[in-house]
Image: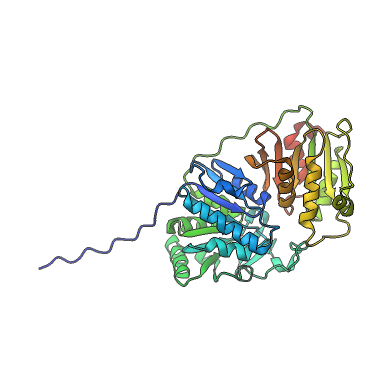
Amino acid sequence: MASPPPPPRPSVSPPVPPYVVALADDLSGAAETACALGGPVRLSLSAVDVAGTAAAHDLVVDLDTRHLPVAEAEEAVRTALRAARSGSPRLLYKKVDSQLRGHLAVEAASYAEGAEAVVIAPALPVARRTVTGGVVRVNGVPLHRTDGWRAERASAPRSLPEALSRLPVRTVPLDVVRSEPAALDAEFRRIAASGAHPAPDAETDADLDAVAAAALRLGPGFRLLGSGGLAAALGRALPRPAAAAPPPAPTQDGTPLLFVVGTAEPRAVAQIARLTAIGAHHVPLDPADLAAGTVRLPSHAAAPALAVLSIDGSAGPRPGAGRALSTALGALAAAYPGRPDLVMTGGETARTTLDALGIGELQPLGQIHHGAVHSRTPDGRHVVTRPGSYGAEDSLLRIAVALRPRLAAS
């Protein structure tokens, strides 16, 4: 009598590469992601670096697509994705804005090409940005009822399925996210088998840890798309050497410290006021003068050691004018005398400033506070990037003291 056939062997997911290629749509988000991943990392401002880089560290690339026309942003992601898949095996990650700004729908659709599914989790609990019922909430308030899109041409989306209109998206409720791992894996597989993409709810870092772990168990066919919160969960889940310890704060060698504030956030006014209270020289720039190129900088001898350049926002946000103003502000900051160390708020402002300086790569050193990433340029300049919407009233002051400890006594 023939022996019964052996039981079917369980399917084994392909091994997950330990290193990541992350694609971001602006520089402050790219820097946040580089720190969040937590391992050895390069942060590049050129998509050319996606192909051919040795897979011995994470690679985060700022594609700088936030300001591009839709078709160009879509193609930039598609081109970077092809390059990433043609090189050494890497785990793919797409960094998106936690308030869903930018060309999210088209970039996500390009990123999904060739994937079994994309796991979508933009929650950022450290900044009190959560997702429940497929709705992004900021401090508990649905995104479309906040003023987070005040400087955008469009209105904020009411849900993740609406924001990702070019992809079929299925939300995954919190009780499933917090269930046994096998149940969450099965739900992700079920949604993928239906031709859709799972968008799990998340309120805590533990929720994001569960989401990242499930995606890794399911293999590289399940790509991740999320904010810095999901990137941090991915970093915690991957077995890699830790990033090198950051060096001490820069020495006090007389190098000026220049804050370049390009954000339209109302809280920026209070943040700048904390700097002027310790003696910072503040130059509010009229948008018309900035665009016309009529702003005059001080001479090298007259340049203060601590200064702030900001766009005067008293007339309110200017939807559609952001890139032109950021470009003019970046050029002005790059021409500032004394070769200052730089603190730049807003991803566009940071990118245009570094472009004007000819800087194409950063070495992230650590975070001063969440989102305020301290990096070093190849020629030794210290820079801090920070999203415009981040930070409490003392954010800029904390950054100043971290870079210039003597200011703590002011």
- Residue at 71 percent across and 31 percent down: it is 250
* Residue sitting at the far left: 1
Which quarter shows the C terminus? top right
Q: Which percent across, then down, holds residue 275?
A: 83, 42
Label tally: 0
Q: Which percent across, then down, holds residue 225?
A: 56, 59
Please say if 393 is above or below 316. above
Left of 9 or right of it: where is 239? right
Left of 268 or right of it: where is 207? left
Q: In the picture, residue 247 is in which quadrant?
A: top right
Q: Which percent across, then down, holds residue 133?
A: 60, 69
Identify which residue, 70 or 344, lies in the foreground. 70
Q: Which percent across, then down, holds residue 341?
A: 75, 36
Please say if 46 is above or below 114. above
Model colouring: rainbow
- Residue at 85 percent across and 55 percent down: it is 313
